[in-house]
Image (spheres, rainbow, N blue to C red):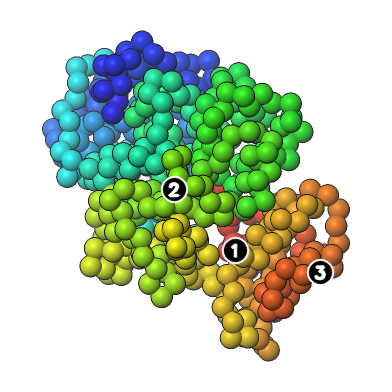
Amino acid sequence: MLAAAAEARPDAEALACGEHRLTYRQYYEAVNGFAAELMRERASLAGERVATVLGNSIEACVAMFGVLASGAQLVPINPLYTQREVDEIAGDAQPSLVVSQRINLAKAKAASFPRPEDLALLQYTGGTTGKSKGVNLTHRAIATNVAQREALLPTRMDAERIVCAMPLFHSYGMAMGLFLAANCRGTLVIMERYRPDDLLRIVQNERITIFPGSPTIFAGLLGHADFADTDWSSVHTCYSGSAALPEETLRRWEQAVGAPVYEGYGQTEAGPVLTFNCVNKIRKIGSVGIPVPETEIRIVEGEVVARGPQLMQGYRNRPQETAEALRNGWLHTGDMGELDADGYLYIRGRKKDMVIVGGYNVYPREVEEVLNAHPAVAEAAVVGGPDAYRGECLHAYVCLRKEVTTDALLSYCGERLAKYKVPATLEVLDALPKTSVGKLDKLPLKARWKP
């Protein structure tokens, strides 16, 4: 993709980060220069792994593509990880080289292209429970997934300006930022660190056309003092991923911005995109869309299972967990969902996130949707906990945009949910805990409640 973009638009702006800019010619030369530097360090990097521990920057983009061009497998690591967390991943990945600071890039001729079946990425999953697992993805799987997403959400060649507020080391940031921009020969405008003030300024000043976001970003910007005064007229498409987007947040965003939000679904093990609402079909609010081409989705005992060419090869050094996740060519996602008559997928929560209250299955996502629809609630999270009488019960935590009593919120839930789905307790917090990639982190909330 990058080679094709550099040949077609050598003088077009490829990367922007603050005042720093690179054309596609410079981008490609830098990538190949860095790939050559890597290959000078080792006689052959085929079958080897190179880790990057880099924050969002032009250098990070160059390094990531450079590793791929060298024939090595890229291992992107969160630069905010502690030494213990980095050591844990490095111990499992056993990288030959680690890139962890800014470097000088020499110009060189094009690096040798790797084979489609070669391993390209070793992407470590969130690790919110237990140890992180390294997902092996080939060049073919990643390139196929870019084309699959493009079939449902086509971009305009040579015309897009895409803001990247998500971490580049994360599967969503790579798929909907790094790879998307190169594929459409657009400009990737990189935020070194997510700050709402800076993001609003970038949208307006850089004339952003595609806005990939997450529920955390959408909700946070809607409540920002400068949101209403920001010029969003250049934005024609928004993507939502990384976590489920509350319906009320989606509706408020679209009304304010004037651009549709296309919600999709996937996971690192799936390259990462499995489904998306698409441009040329009905967009169903609340669903995560239809399967991308050459992908099958089934619901087996409530769980979403998927099959397609973009799936992982398996988990590194974890044959048992690979066998559990990949069965007869089908990826068992661990997510609970439903398919409607038109084949649209609805995510109902994590399999392990299901709470059994008095014998009834309750998915916290449903309760969160109700709370998020209340005009006083900015964000909500619901977790399960042990209960001597009902086996388990629900505990809700909310952040508010205006004053409301907990009794009023519980009454609101009672009007919209079966009695057993109404939270047993509700607590107002200044902020809900997040993981390093901005996802809601429910572990601290579960630990917070004491029976």
> Where residue 440 sits: x, y (%)?
59, 55
**Where's residue 11, x and y in %?**
36, 10
Dot 1 corresponds to which residue?
365
Which residue corresponds to mark 3?
Answer: 411
Q: Position of residue 317 (x, y in %)?
A: 26, 60
Up-down relation of residue 92 to residue 406 (above or below): above
- Whole-angstrom CA distance, mark 1 to mark 3, is 18 Å
Amino acid at the residue labelled 2: Phe
Q: Earlier in the sequence, mark 2 or mark 3?
A: 2
Q: What is the x, y in percent for residue 205?
A: 60, 18
The amino acid on which the numbered mark 1 sits, given as a three-letter code, is Arg
Please state if 321 lies on the left or on the right of 350 as rendered: left
Residue 422 in view here: yes
Nearer the observer: mark 2 or 1; the answer is: 2
**Residue located 48% across and 20% down the image:** 16
Which residue was labeled with disc 2?
276
The secondary structure type at the circle numbered 2 is strand
Q: Is residue 109 above or below residue 351?
A: above
| Cα distance in 3D space between marks 2 and 1 | 19 Å
Disc number placed over residue 450 in the picture, else none: none
Helix, strand or loop status at disc 1? helix
Residue type, label 3: Ser
Q: Residues within 10 Å of mark 1 (few under 14, many from 20)?
A: many
Does 43 appear above or below 172?
above
Q: Residue at x 56, y 28 (%)?
A: 235
Q: Which residue occupies the extreme left position in the image? A: 43
The correct choice, above or below, for 235 with respect to 98 in the image is above
